[in-house]
Image (spheres, rainbow, N blue to C red):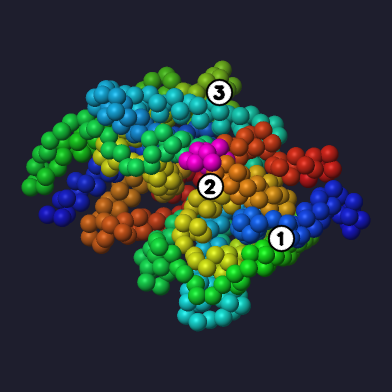
Amino acid sequence: MTAIQILIDGFAISALYALGATGFTLIFGVSGVLNLSHGALMVTAAVVAWAASSEFGLGPFGGAAAGILACTVLTLATYALVVKPIDRSTAIPTVEKEIFILTGTLLWGIMIQEFIAYLFTSNAKTVMPLVEGIVLIAGIRTPWNQIVTAGVCWAVIGLLWLLVNRTRTGKVVLAASMNPRGVTLLGFELSQIYVVIWLIYGVLAGIAGVLLGQFLGVSSYSVGPLTASAFSIVVLGGLGSVSGSLIAAYVVGYLETMTAYLVSPAYRTIPALLLLVAVMYVRPQGLLGRR
Amino acid sequence: MTLKLVTSPLFWLTIVFLVVAAFLPLGVSGYILGLLTVAYYFGVFSMAWDLLFGFAGEVNFGPTFLIGLGAYTAGILNGNGVSIPVCLAAGAVAAVVGGVVLALPALRVRGPYFGLTTVVAVLILQNLIVVFAETTGGEIGLTVPDVISIDAATNYWIALGFMTVSGLVLFAIARSPVGLILQASGQDPVEAGALGFNVAKHKLAAFCVSAFFSGLAGALFVFYMGTASVGTLVDVSVGVQVIIAAVLGGRRTIVGAVLGAVFLIAAGEVLRPLGALSTFVVSAMALAVILFVPAGLLGLLTRQGQRA
């Protein structure tokens, strides 16, 4: 009984983790940016969706759309206001760009978090689910919403795969992640590619945020843990490797669910952290990382 | 060398700052002294971090791992009846041991991987503190039976003295030949290695020094506050503040970190009337400094004087 429960719950949570981490790893793979405001972007999507659907009466779908839109706009703003100026700055030595982008996005994330707390308080909010009702799977009462969450996550990841592998824009993005200079030599504007990627990232983070808000609920306190979990999933899978992140998301998701059910919810995150440390000792480049 | 130091504006700025700071208790209220005491301990945290980042080129996202180890070791021992000086020494030693355990695997990896390892160390420590709540006080925090002093001025002078000594030692290390080797290893480990310097050994040494001061400062801070809790000493957000203070003050300067810490604490206090928005404004100001004045506040002050 518990085993099936873990299988079902873990699947949905892992799918959410996977979607959340995909955009994060995409940005790193292509532009080498680790965006530490990731969690804040996801929380923005969820909180805007909550406000639009519950407070302004736009309904679950209108709310979700508003949340995704807000997150996308904010993600583009992150690029335009924080990442790009640091990247272009002549006052910062190239070797130190990384720490500046990390610190800058971190501060940006804190600003978003505080602003959300100011506007909407730091209470936990649960977004109106897209579908109501429950269904029995092998004798386990499962909310339809959980199934929809997992389904949407995988559909979006599938669409992303199609976009990257089957469209011209996607192929340019893929090429840019392999060799930015080569792409420039072929006549593509690198800065335009970056905007496209940040746009994709914004949509992905938005969808993940809204779904997370429906499934688990969010508050402004979720910002740090969300960023940390995306970061560790991505490192576990290998920085820049999308398929590695997907596998890692499932490993972490199931490990956490199992710990929560079988040991105690208080220890939920510990085994995943220990696993991460173990992987860093043995295989620092992560499961599927190239180095 | 000595002559150059004496004629540099930085040297005189520091002297003036210290003299003014030393006489402050005669003129200002205990409340402000309390704030500055906290700021000075934070200054030491940030200076220790700057040695690791600015000179060894390693981004330690988990300064609070070292601080927390020192603080909790000292606090728990004191709870079992050990005297304060022994607790302080034990806290510093625990931080150094923890630093070595963390550094050995972490220094094998670079860049974001190193950063992540250090964050994970903090998260694990945080979880352990909560799990072993019977000894550590868990999320509520640990109360230590002894404090160094209840007099605000005494506490202030201890913090100021400790900060000055730590700053001198760290600054001396940074400016010594060892500091140069560290800087070289941070910028180009391969070339530094090719020149015959043991990069790993020097970085490990830097980590130990950084850990020593972080741990000792953490332990002293516990005996100043009378309590230790995850929220004030271990949480990742505290580590973020330490980093922001160092970057804000001017990285690779050691002394700038103190300036950043005092600025952060003062700004947080001045903006208190804004309520929930104060952290927002402080973060925005820090972001502005990073974007527009990447050399930091100290870089702004000594721009004409010397180009580091």
* Residue drawn at point x = 53 percent, y = 33 percent: A31
Nearer-N-terminus badge (2/1): 1
Left or right of residue A228, residue B211 in this image: right
- Expressed as whole percent of the image width and height from the top left, the position of residue A8 reads 19, 46
User: Which chain is mark 3 on?
Assistant: A
* Residue occupied by mark 1: B25
- Expressed as whole percent of the image width and height from the top left, the position of residue B79 reads 47, 77
Nearer mark to the viewer, of 2 and 1: 1
Position of residue B286 relative to residue B67, above or below, is: above
Residues at marks 2 and 1, CA–CA distance in whole angstroms: 43 Å
Left or right of residue B173, residue B74 in this image: left
* Residue drawn at point x = 40 percent, y = 45 percent: A221
Q: What amino acid is at disc 2?
A: Pro
Q: What amino acid is at disc 1?
A: Pro
Q: What amino acid is at disc 3?
A: Ser
Residues at marks 3 and 2, CA–CA distance in whole angstroms: 23 Å
Q: Nearer the viewer, residue A113 or A169?
A: A113
Q: Which residues are magenta?
A: B273-282
Q: Nearer the viewer, residue A156 or A270?
A: A270
* Residue occupied by mark 2: B112
In contact (CB < 8 Å): disc 2 and disc 1? no
* Residue occupied by mark 3: A191
- Residue B159 seen from this side: no
* Residue drawn at point x = 80 percent, y = 43 percent: B302
Q: Are marks 3 and 2 on the same chain?
A: no
